[in-house]
Amino acid sequence: MTAPADRYVNEAYASLGLRPVVNAAATLTKLGGSLVAPPVLPAMAAASRNFVDVFELHRAVGQRLAKVTGNEAALVSSGAAALLTLAVIGCVSGPKGGPNPVAIEDLPYLDKTGEKTVIIYGSQRNAYDYAVRQVGVRIVEVGPEPDELAAAIDERTACVLWFAGAHFSAGALPIEQVVDIAHRAGVPVVVDGAAQVPPISSLWHFTAEVGADAAVFSGGKGLRGPQSTGLMVGKGWLIEAARANGAPNHSLGRGMKVGKEELLGLLAAVEWSLQQDEPALLAAYETSVQKWIAGLSGLPGIEVERGYPSEAGQPHGRAMVHIGPASGWDRDSLVEALWSADPHIAVGAVDPDVIALNPQTLQNGEDELVLSELRRLLESRRR
């Protein structure tokens, strides 16, 4: 099946001098995350027709999301990074009690509260540290030995932050051990699972099954909700402390706002996602990967293999295309040529001579479009 040509006729983008993208890269924010699931836009349109008490709506949506994911509580905010900030604020201002007005007013300098720290594995440090550091806490790095984590915990520790995904596993203890060590010391654990859907079971695995106090997810990646949303699930005390510091309350998280439309849109996306046949979806991804491997194998200077898991550690494969000199291309020029197509074609630039083709963000027939354009380019420079 080929992608219908009219799929890429978008007057809104064209009026701005832009053209759509065929996304064979990933659920990247810079490309718009994902395409929303079918029930999302109708839910957002329904929300737009009336005013509502946003405090009540936040609580009602949170209660529904908690119920359908098997968690004590849930909170929607403006993306997973925002929820990292709110989770850390919750750990600083309301551990095991409830929102502490003194701590809330003290953010982010913590002059009255005193220094607070967040423990992170050194191997898991990444650009989302900013979401944590803006709270005013100091990051303490630890290594993979259990004794290192235990020794780093003291009266200043607000929480341990653990990043999920196979790509973050090296140099860190498994989440089960992290929770055990931290909880024995009375310290909460927050999991960043932003891109860990699939599997959908991530929505309850880290919290209800393993026992982490909170886990945060992007609403606009695998869940296919509004790109400007994120979901936090977990313990009631932490969700309440985070909620007290987020919009529409006036606190450090006031700017982390989602409207009534995004709230109902994410709820619709999660409920839709829970109804999907995930094994069939993953099998369809694998079909695309094998199609790419078969279609590109044997071209001069090109070697193709299956990469697993995905770039975000998700349980599905990618086609890893190794570009040798005999192909007549280097990685960057080939990536640029694909991007110059109409519509643009986005792929992952991995190692210096490797591009990755990811099936997760493709619509029906687009795997063929990507294969056709890639073959055309590669065959145009045969030596």
Image (tube, helix red, strand yellow):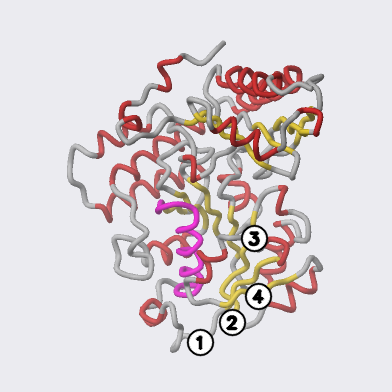
Q: Nearer the viewer, residue 165 or 302?
A: 302
Q: Earlier along the polypeptide chain: callout 3 or callout 1?
A: 1
Q: Nearer the viewer, residue 279 or 328?
A: 328
The quarter of the image holding the N terminus is top right
Q: Bounds of the magenta span?
A: 76-96
Q: CA distance from mark 3 to mark 2?
A: 18 Å
Return the x and y of residue 199 as percentages of the image width and height: 62, 38
Crowding around mark 3 (Cα neighbors within 10 Å: few <14, some 14 to 19, many 20+) is many
Crowding around mark 2 (Cα neighbors within 10 Å: few <14, some 14 to 19, many 20+) is some
User: Residue tagged by mark 1?
Assistant: 114
Image mark for residue 59: none
Q: Nearer the viewer, mark 4 or mark 2?
A: 4
Measured along the vertical axis of the image, is residue 176 above or below residue 323? below
- Residue placed at 41% from the left, 51% from the top? 76
Identified by mark 2, the residue type is Arg
User: Residue tagged by mark 3?
Assistant: 162
Q: Nearer the viewer, residue 334 or 127?
A: 334
**Extreme top residue here?**
1
Identified by mark 1, the residue type is Gly
Q: Do the residues bearing badges 3 and 1 touch, measured as CB atoms within 8 Å?
A: no
Q: Is residue 293 magenta?
A: no
